[in-house]
Image (spheres, coloured by chain):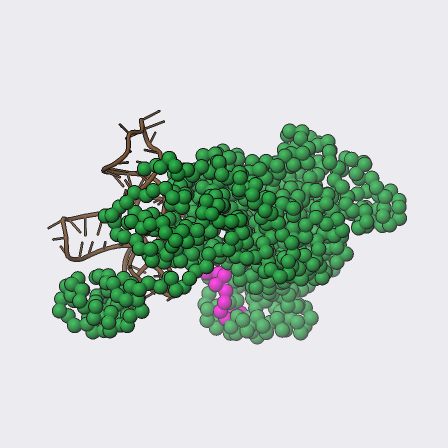
Chain colours: A green, B brown
Amino acid sequence: MANTAIPTYDPQAIEPRWRAAWQKAGLFRVTEDPAKPKFFNLVMFPYPSGPLHMGHFRNYVFGDAFARYKVMRGFNVLNPFGWDAFGLPAENAAIQSGIPPRISTEQNIEISKGELNIMGVMYAWDREVTTCNPDYYRWNQWLFLKFFERGLAYKKLAPVNWCPKDNTVLANEQIVNGRCWRCGTPPTKRDLEQWFFKITAYADRLLEGLKRLDRWPERVKVMQTNWIGRSEGAEFDFPVEGNHPPVRVFTTRLDTIYGVTFMVLAPEHPLVPAITAPAQRAAVVAYLEKTRTETEVERLSTEHEKTGVFTGAYARNPFTNEQVPIWVADYVLATYGTGAIMGVPGNDARDFHFATQHGLPIREVVSAKPEPIGIPKTALELGLAEGFAVNSGPYRGLPSAEALARITAEAEGRGIGTRTVTYRLRDWLISRQRYWGTPIPIVYCPDHGIVPVPEADLPIELPPFVQFRSDGQNPLMHMPEFVDTICPRCGKPAKRETDTMDTFVDSSWYFLRMATGPDDTQPFDKRKVDYWMPVDQYTGGIEHAILHLLYARFFVKVLFDAGMVSVDEPFAALFSQGMILRFGSAMSKSKGNGVEPNYIVEAYGADTGRIYELFIGPPELDAEWNDRGVEGVAKFLHRVWRLVVGDSIEARPDLAPVSSADLVRKLHEVIDKVTRDVEGFHFNTAMSALMELANTMQSYLQSGGVRDAAWDGVARDLTRLLAPFAPHLAEELWTRQGQKGLVAFAAWPEVDQALLKRDTVLLVVEVDGKVRDRIPVPAGGDQARAHARALESEKVQRSLAGRPVARAIYVQDRLINLVTR
RNA sequence: GCGGGCGUAGCCGAAUUGGUACAGGCGCAUGCUUUAGGAGCAUGUGGGGCAACCCGUGGAGGUUCGAGUCCUCUCGCCCGCACCA
């Protein structure tokens, strides 16, 4: 059947030519043109780890296809890329290999860029951002100073999470299941002076903003909401017997105050040493030592065991005037609320376990009825805590909510408590005791203490070449030429901060830099940023649901308050794509289950790889890579080639004929479907619609259809529909169809609603809800006519078996249901 | 434990508001091509039954003319949070 005069589809021969053409034509080269509608399309920029695999490409192919589509829809599309280039892997690799991070990073970027290119993934490279370049990180330092000026960057001594493997501290967000997010090592606690960003000041704004993000996945919003963990309650003072200050507790259930039978302080609570009685001192000290040396994992593993010791001190319940013992226990966290709680074992499952374990009394204060019904025996029954206050003095018999309101009012009236809101969110710890990051622009002066580096002295450059140490310490600490400086205020000798910034600082504003392009005078250009922001479509992995996406939102809110940007949410629409799995787990270098882009390009061509990634499954779900599936896509593209370029097609007169009108209608159905699917990021169903169109074109030719003008129109539109997804093939076909210019810049096909209409539809006929026949009827017909036609059907008559039709349900052009009962 | 989501063919998966269950791909079967192989192309393909028909979206009920879709219960799987007072 192969006609030697017709060239076959040879992707390796055509693809490089079209990539050169796009570069020459400036695909994705943009300027801020107020006359055109803008579209900021962004994929999360990666860490430059060198060779990519097809798992990485899912994100890039989605982004590239979507950006190309938006160009065809007439938008001024900003489609930039960059490298989140600071961070531990390069430094750790350098310690192993001796190659400086700067060099290995550059090499890795070149490798990755080459692979993006051969897959036809194009970007506005003139706006590339590489975070480890001084012309980027100097603006990190500049922004740090702005945060410092606004009181949003501060230093404090705090018990922090220390990763002994990575030799650095970690932010709370970077502890995943009690382990370091990067290397999986259980962190230990250390008391260190560290730099923080005051993200807690924005807790409510970060929550409120989520409500407006209607084009974000629900699960990401839920995760962020839980992470921020807002809870309303009251702070409340318990006087301590003896000459001690009162202990302040936070509770959301002040209505249970009559049930307090003990109090608990966190081991790190500052009052613990002061109030501990001499007789208990040894036991308390031993307990503090034990909790201190335990890792998070060890504390988690003893989850159900509520350890603690009595301090020997007593507090007084201001409502009952009862004496209650004060304990220390590590189930109370120093970093949440006030670091102290009132123990209400009759209503709180944790307090119940603690009381049971240590023989403390349990009193019923919440009951299902307005009178006591007896203490619940299991923790399960606790926590179902809404009911009526009982054993609660003047408040007994009141519903929980009312008791809460009244007791809170009394506490406020007596000046011993106030309504407060507490968050689970902690301030963002940004110090890292590592070399490969942005130096924090601070100087320590013996006379002036913490002194910010003046803007004019920026950047504080990271020494490009350093001697790494076997003990894992930050090499900067041991470089006098870096550390020794003078105080910007008094000129006397002073020391530089040697900690560097968390790399999540770098990624919190890179999109603003991309919206600006190269600029020596400022971190970003407000005019350009106002034009491009917010990001209209942001695509990346779910692993950043909290970390990066929360930090970036925080940054933009701060910059909004500073008048530097005009939006306070950076990402209008977010898409979190699933991973590509192979042999059951995520593709990765270490597992050796990656598929290399080079292999795909050489074996099938870049377009096959791209379409397969789009077709493999629902974009938001993980998908298993299947080598045979790739071949199926390759067959599809070969078929498209034969159809469009004009190879002969075997006639099949035995098949149901496809008319020219059928073909054109199918085209418009597919235009409609693909357009809606792409807008909704349903690339898998968009690809299957394109396959259907090709199958219909095949059937048309098989049943004797000819390649006339209508056919040519269909072929041209198929080419345009393919352009964002199989861009090389589409360009080649476009040229072979005699079209001028690049299909990349052609207009996206429009649906002709009139052509979607059918003259005749197949009406489903049901009898008592069961499908009995399908009959052709004129489209848009009325019920009476359809009913009459349905009754003519032999199959319908057989089903009715003479029974009268009691009523009929009619859905125009879809079905008629004849009901006999 | 709390929160979110998901169970459809041998496999991956489609199905506006409740209206023809299974589009598209893989696999499989058959055929074509003088094709050296597991290549290429085409056709067919949920199960049962000779047929008329019957059955079929994890399971059991329910609402409805009509349920993959809505409701109740139940089983299984995945993800997130996890002593947050």
Classify A626 as above or below A242: above
Q: Nearer the viewer, residue A369 or A447?
A: A447
x%, y% of residue A429?
Answer: 67, 49
Q: Tell me what residue is drawn at x 33 percent, y 55 percent.
A: A660
The percent position of residue A134, horizontal first and vertical second, equals 73, 43
| Magenta stretch contains residue A579 | no
Which image quarter: residue A106?
Answer: top right
User: Residue B50 at what x, y percent from top left?
Assistant: 14, 49
Provide the major secondary structure of the magenta segment.
Answer: loop
Viewer can see residue A262: no
Foreground of the two, A707 or B43 = A707
What residue is rendered at 67% in x and 29% in y? A98
In magenta stretch: residue A384:
yes
Observer able to see residue A481: yes
- Judge from the rendering whether residue A42 lies leftward or rightward of residue A785; answer left or right: right
Instruction: Count all numbered tags in the image, as a single digit.
Output: 0
- Quadrant of the frame with the N terminus of chain A: top left
Quarter of the C terminus of chain A within the rendering: bottom left
What's drawn in magenta, residue-wise?
A: A381-391
* Residue at image coords 51%, 35%: A598
